Image (spheres, rainbow, N blue to C red):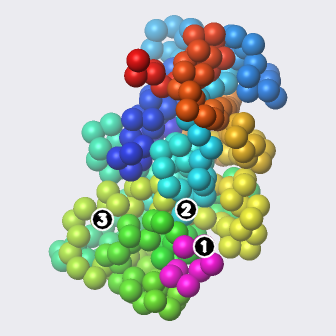
Amino acid sequence: MSSRLRAPTASTALAVLVLVLVLVAPACTRAAPTDPSASPGTNGPGSPTAVGSPASGGELRYMLRYDPESIDPGFVLESEGAVVVDALFDSLLAYDDDLRPVPAVAERFEVDETTTLYTFHLDPDAVFHDGSPVDAQAFVRAWSRIVDGTADDLSPNAHHLAAVAGYEESRRDGTPLAGVEAVDAQTLRVTLQYPYADFPAVVAHPALGPVPAAAVEDTVNFREAPIGNGPFKMAGPWQHDEFIRVQRFEDHHRDVPKLDEVVFRIYRGDDAEEQAYADFEEGLVHVATVPRE
């Protein structure tokens, strides 16, 4: 799983998760408990078999300070939702450890001399968790859904695409985003309204990940159990105020995780950090915020 960062409000939480998922792959039993509050040490991160040679398998239990507003990429609002979306979805590009855009779904891209025309070439092996292809139309669908100003539920992430041609019309009339074109299944062309050399960094944002047809055909179920294209897939519907469980996606086109699964355990109340840290000390969670005091 490549290192990926969220919006600034989510960078700390995500950086911790990415490092744990990539570098601290656990050596432990495969069977995962159905209860995320399992006894200390059960299926948790263990010692690698050898230095520099992490073992496969096991479960990571990760603290969320509250129930996310959304785990649908187009509607993700804050760090708690973004860290889950990052596990479930890949955008066109991702960020490496030096915050540089690197390939994710797009194997490569070109930009013209005006920096207003970007052409992204998608990995033909990229698929959604339901087996359907991650093609250029999946990005057209996702981005048009985000900027649609006439939708019943307005996305809070439309501003990320403000530079794309047709943005104002989409916000006003709900028309498809004119500047996003599926040239063919593996080629996405994006036309901007003005030069924007930082656009590759924008398309690495988790809110701009692709979505399958189910995202618009069955919105209610999609928001509870999103069908993504990332290295982890939903292991069952979101258990609000309790946990979100994701499991390794064996058919990921680029980075199959070493972990069997991640349980995002949701804490509630003003003392959420204290609760989580106490559980961390007991071995009930593996990643938690250190309370300020």
Q: Is residue 14 above or below residue 170?
A: above
Q: Which region of the structure is painted magenta? A: 148-154
* Residue at screen point 60% across, 34% down: 269
Q: Local crowd at mark 3 within 10 Å, few (<14), some, or many (≥20)?
A: some
Q: Is residue 3 above or below residue 33?
A: below
Task: Give percent across and percent down for residue 115.
Answer: 22, 73
- Circle 1 sits on which residue? 153
- Circle 2 sits on which residue? 75
Judge from the rendering whether residue 292 lies leftward or rightward of residue 182; answer left or right.
left
- Circle 3 sits on which residue? 199
Mark in front: 2 vs 1? 1
The answer to whether residue 52 shows anywhere in this view is yes
Q: Secondary structure at mark 1?
A: loop
Task: Give percent across and percent down for residue 178.
Answer: 43, 86
* Residue at screen point 66% across, 17% down: 284
Give the Cα separation between the discs numbered 3 and 2.
20 Å
Q: Is residue 144 above or below residue 261?
A: below
Looking at the image, tell me whether mark 2 or mark 1 is earlier in sequence order. Answer: 2
Instruction: Mark 2 and mark 1 in contact? Answer it, CB < 8 Å.
Output: yes
Looking at the image, tell me whether mark 3 or mark 2 is earlier in sequence order. Answer: 2
Q: Amino acid at mark 1?
A: Asp
Q: Amino acid at mark 3?
A: Phe
Q: Local crowd at mark 2 within 10 Å, few (<14), some, or many (≥20)?
A: many
The residue nearer to you, when weighing 156 against 94, is 156
Task: Give percent across and percent down for residue 234.
Answer: 71, 45
Q: Residue furthest left?
A: 113
Judge from the rendering whether residue 268 lies leftward or rightward of residue 291; answer left or right.
right
Residue 150 inside the magenta-drawn segment = yes
Q: Secondary structure at mark 3?
A: helix
Judge from the rendering whether residue 231 lies leftward or rightward of residue 96; answer left or right.
right
Check the picture and name the quadrant holding the C terminus.
Answer: top left
Looking at the image, tell me whether mark 3 or mark 1 is earlier in sequence order. Answer: 1
